[in-house]
Amino acid sequence: MPYAVRVMSFSNDYRLKNVYLPQFDGFRGFFCFTILVIHHHYWYVNIPSNIGYFTMHSFFIMSSFLITRSLMIDKQRSDSFKTFFTKFYIKRTLRIFPVYFAYLLFTLLIGLLTAPTVYKPVLGIMYELKYFGWMLLTFTYNFKDLYALFADLTYNKSLAFPHLWSLSLEEQFYFIVPFMIYFLSEKALKRLTIAMIILFPIIRVVGYQWLCTLTDDNMHRSFILYRCTFFQYDAFFYGTFLALFDIKWSDKIMNLIFYALLSAFVLTIPVNGWILHLQTGESFAHIITGYDFMTRNGQYIYIDVLVNLLCTVFFYLCFKSENRFSFFRNKFIVDVGARITYSSYVYQYIFIIPTLLFVFPFLLEQLQIGRLASELISMVLSVAGLLLLSHFSYITLETYFLKKKDYFLSKVN
């Protein structure tokens, strides 16, 4: 039987067809705010960086599951690989590219306008575009930190682009997944998925030891390990695992596993933070909110596996009961997740940067209203502005291209 019409055996409704899972959008909408909080780098209005790490991995796993499920269904409906591949990239390009490249054009404009001012070195936009712009354009920006290590370049010069690594990592998965789904049998896909889930933790440990021989900058090592495809690709294979494997364990067993993993994950924060506090004398709060927290005192050996397993079990529980985690079915956060999470993530530094450079210092130093109050007010203003811009982007720019997507898909034979 040709690859394009081979029927794949699914047993659960959530894998058999494109069943809408509102708690996915709710989860995405709620946890988008955790990323925004962490990226402001405040002292009081902040959360442990492990939570942000959990959020990013949940996005990767969720995206991979949805893409894999959609492609497995499209495979049965496509009469050729050309049709299958073209439809997929029409969908992804018109969803991802408009917002992404609009942000790049905006930052380029800001970089040119501030080039003759004292803000040029502060923003670092022109430096980043000069040395790493080609990586932003080719969706290889997640390799920037590794490249900078060997090219003797400053890896953290710019305030405008640090979040875009995740889009590069996702695009690299989007490039290979159509080939995986179309040309591999379900059995081969399952074997590949298991192999990647087993292999990458080993690669991470070896990679961490290797990086320790190359640099003493723990933050630089952290960025390489968090962002580089060589060390993070297994998160996406947990998503394919969700689409391929039907786990039929009882609710009692799944609940037990979930709460055991959740407890272990939560405990990693105070336990490792306190150990580091005793060893270094640093502030406990500063340690656990630092970007490099998870690569200190050996955490990285197990933290990725723990986070990926926790996310996967969480999603299985969502599949098994629509009423589970009902908080994530709240209409507001579902709407945020469905419509503006992506644009909010991309546009966030349009508000974070002026908040950090102008709003927060003005409140703290000029009005002298206290650090906690200054952080709270700044955060509210930043997030509110971002939500308004993202909503405007959705109803204008994104909706326009989504309509174009339907038009182009109708033209594909």
Image (cartoon, helix red, strand yellow):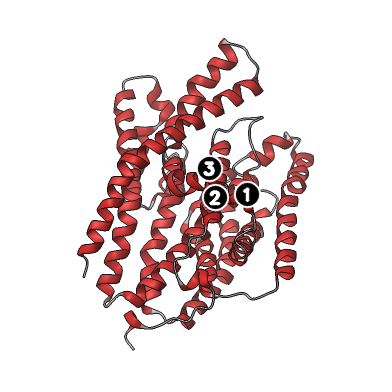
Question: If you read the primary sequence from the N terminus, does the residue marked by circle 2 or circle 3 appear first?
Answer: 2
Which residue is label 2 attached to?
26
Query: What's the residue type where badge 1 is placed?
Result: Phe
The alpha-carbon separation of the residues under discs 2 and 3 comes to 8 Å
Residue picked out by circle 3? 332
Relative image position of residue 138 (x, y in whole percent): 32, 52
Instruction: Identify the element where label 2 is drawn.
Output: helix
Q: Are marks 2 and 3 in contact (CB under 8 Å)?
A: no
Q: Of circles 2 and 3, which is in front?
A: 3
Q: Secondary structure at mark 1?
A: helix
| Residue occupying the point 61% across, 44% down | 292
Q: Report the amino acid beneath label 2.
A: Gly
Instruction: Using the rendered image of the protein, determine whether residue 217 is visible from the camera's viewpoint.
Output: no
- Return the residue nearer the eye: 168 or 30: 30
- Provide the residue designation for mark 1: 327
The quadrant in which the C terminus is found is bottom left
- Residue 70 appearing in the image: yes
| Circle 1 Cα neighbour tier, 10 Å, few/some/many (<14 / 14–19 / ≥20) | some
Tell me the amino acid under the disc marked 3.
Phe
Residue drawn at 35 percent across, 19 percent down: 117
Label located before the other in sequence (3 or 1):
1
Q: Are marks 2 and 1 in contact (CB under 8 Å)?
A: yes
Q: Disc 2 versus disc 1: distance between alpha carbons? A: 8 Å
Disc 3 secondary structure class: helix
Q: Is residue 115 above or below residue 3?
A: above
List x then y, in percent, for residue 310: 65, 60
Q: Nearer the viewer, residue 15 or 386?
A: 15
State the quadrant of the N terminus. Answer: bottom left
Q: Is residue 120 above or below residue 310?
A: above
